Image (spheres, rainbow, N blue to C red):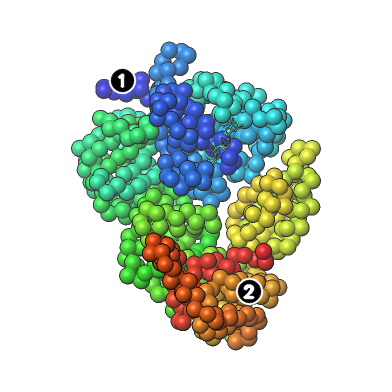
Amino acid sequence: MNIEEMQARQKHIRNFSIVAHIDHGKSTISDRILEATHTVTEREMQDQLLDTMDLERERGITIKMNAVEVHYRANDGEDYIFHLVDTPGHVDFSYEVSRSLAAADGAILVVDAAQGVEAQTLANVYLAIENDLEILPVINKIDLPAADPEAVRKEIEDVIGIDASDAVLASAKKGIGIPELLEKIVKDIPAPEGELEAPLQALIFDSAYDSYKGVILTIRVKTGVLQPGDKIKFMNSGAEYEVTEVGVNSPTPIKRDFLMAGDIGYVAASIKNIRDARPGDTITHLKRPAAKPLPGYQPMTPMVYSGLYPTDNAKYNDLRDALEKLQLNDASLEFEPETSQALGFGFRTGFLGLLHMDVIQERLEREFDLDLITTAPSVTYHAYTTDGEMVEVANPSELPDVSEIKSIEEPFVHAQIMVPNDYVGAVMELAQSKRGEFDTMDYLDENRVNVKYYMPLSEIIFDFFDKLKSSTRGYASLDYEISGYRQSELVKIDILLNGDKVDALSFIVHRDFAQERSRVITKKLKEIIPRRNFEIPVQAAIGSKIVARSTIKAYRKDVTSRIHTGDPDRRAKLLDKQKRGKKRMKAVGTVEVPQEAFMAVLKTDEE
Ligand SMILES: Nc1nc2c(ncn2[C@@H]2O[C@H](COP(=O)(O)OP(=O)(O)OP(=O)(O)O)[C@@H](O)[C@H]2O)c(=O)[nH]1
């Protein structure tokens, strides 16, 4: 292709992302776009096509973004190339959203016609506005009986402050509004700009590991042209490679002869060292390099930390390899080695939230065949010692001794909760009970409000969201950002099993809740930890003072005798079941502690 042909091609490219609050229909709209443009045949079509991970399908959520090339013949008779970047909606994955927006020129904003603007609608659309993207509002689910597109149109204008007078009214489920949306993408989203003849600058915005091709990078080419055989350099890491393949996902990988300024696609270069090619880095040519790299990404700071330990200590290296590979695919994952007296060698791992933690743990177990023990998540505390030092504590058992601590600070968030009027009382009561400090309350319209609170992050990450949903019958939506550190009256609670302190069970809690949570957790552990042929005291202690206790009674009769069943098949099954159950247990001294026990601290009340 010569330069003139490339310039003409560039004018026909549209790069866009789809943003929305969770469940407002992003993935369904993407599916419909793929269908309407015949990117996939009907036979290949399955729901949530872009949610490629099994985990995403099972849970019905998008975790990873995906970039797909789509071809569309518009009403003007011209052929257009769309690069569609699907993004996750959950607050834990907003990092993925901001990365994909940096690769796009426009954003489709999907708002549910029955729900209206929700907390993450706002958070995500602001990210798009910050990235100077053209925003196309789409009011989806107009087929629902409760849909009120006009009210939602007004809400988009009043609350977000963008023109929604010609928002597309759609039902992704029924295919309504999709042709109109495709035309609007052509008309309203600007074609990419970027010199084709300038030195190469390509932004890496995602990466994944392939055991045959090495690291595969998803890139947005900003300037220049990239071809197989090109010698390239990563401007931040300094690594050099030769390109083996370029292409696009449509949605399966298709090799191409080149990627040019404006394209979004993938590149492989037999990259074996995953540290050489991090998202945020810029690719340029070795021979004719760009003057400077593109602005990368702000590193994300994890919100919560938890210890990951292989149940089989021999798998420590496997776990490290698995974490390194996952990190490549998930730049927000952080980890460093730690040791626990109770659990052995493992990693303190940082996550963006509990859902993220859950997903990582499940991916490690499924994709890398590991059995893990995860300790309860903890935020990072700042402990000020009497000699004036500040110690960052992401692992509660590492909190310095009480006698050495002058004060402790914990992270607070600014939370906004959007909720119908009727539930404001319930929301406030809940926020107050979680040590929330009221900030403001604004009306979104006659019957919905936006309530803002300052709250300790530690209270939010545990069960706040679930409680919020249940106390508002699912109507409330929540978004938050870190607002800073504040001093709090915090204490560390240690758990002793059979008289031995189990470091991996320690947790930090507000003094006012210490007694109650100690009582609940000792009771929970009593239910969870299997009995032995001796009595096991379970104690909670602050320093050397025992504040709560329970006792796991010794069993009297030999329960294993139940296995002596005549049927060998059944017996094998029982033994197998026992073995699998055992996998996620860890012998701590004389006591077998199952995985569940480490999460018991998350349950803040009795069920
Ligand atoms: N009635 C109706 N339901 C819809 C429509 N579009 C999507 N849904 C349903 O809404 C639910 C959420 O849709 P998704 O496309 O998964 O939403 P999402 O925004 O991609 O959600 P995440 O990927 O989890 O962020 C699914 O059960 C869809 O079937 C629509 O136009 N009408």
Q: Quadrant of residue 149?
A: top right
Q: Position of residue 141 (x, y in %)?
A: 62, 30
Residue at the spot of label 1: 5
Is residue 57 among the parts visible in the rendering? yes
What's the mark number on residue 167?
none
* Mark 1, other Cα within 10 Å: few <14 / some 14–19 / many ≥20: few
Q: Name above or below for residue 189 compared with residue 432.
A: above
Q: Name above or below for residue 485 compared with residue 515.
A: above
Q: Position of residue 272 (x, y in %)?
A: 25, 52
In terms of secondary structure, where does tag 1 sit? Answer: helix
Q: Quadrant of the N terminus?
A: top left
- Tell me which image quadrant ligand 1 sits in: top right
Q: Is mark 2 within 8 Å of ligand 1?
A: no
Q: Give the amino acid type for the residue marked by disc 1 in the picture.
A: Glu
Q: Total marks drawn?
A: 2
Q: Residue at x 27, y 42 (%)?
A: 268
Residue at the spot of label 2: 523
Q: Residue at x 28, y 36 (%)?
A: 246
In terms of secondary structure, where does tag 2 sit? Answer: helix
Q: Give the amino acid type for the residue marked by disc 2 in the picture.
A: Lys
Q: Earlier in the sequence, mark 1 or mark 2?
A: 1
Q: Quadrant of residue 555?
A: bottom right
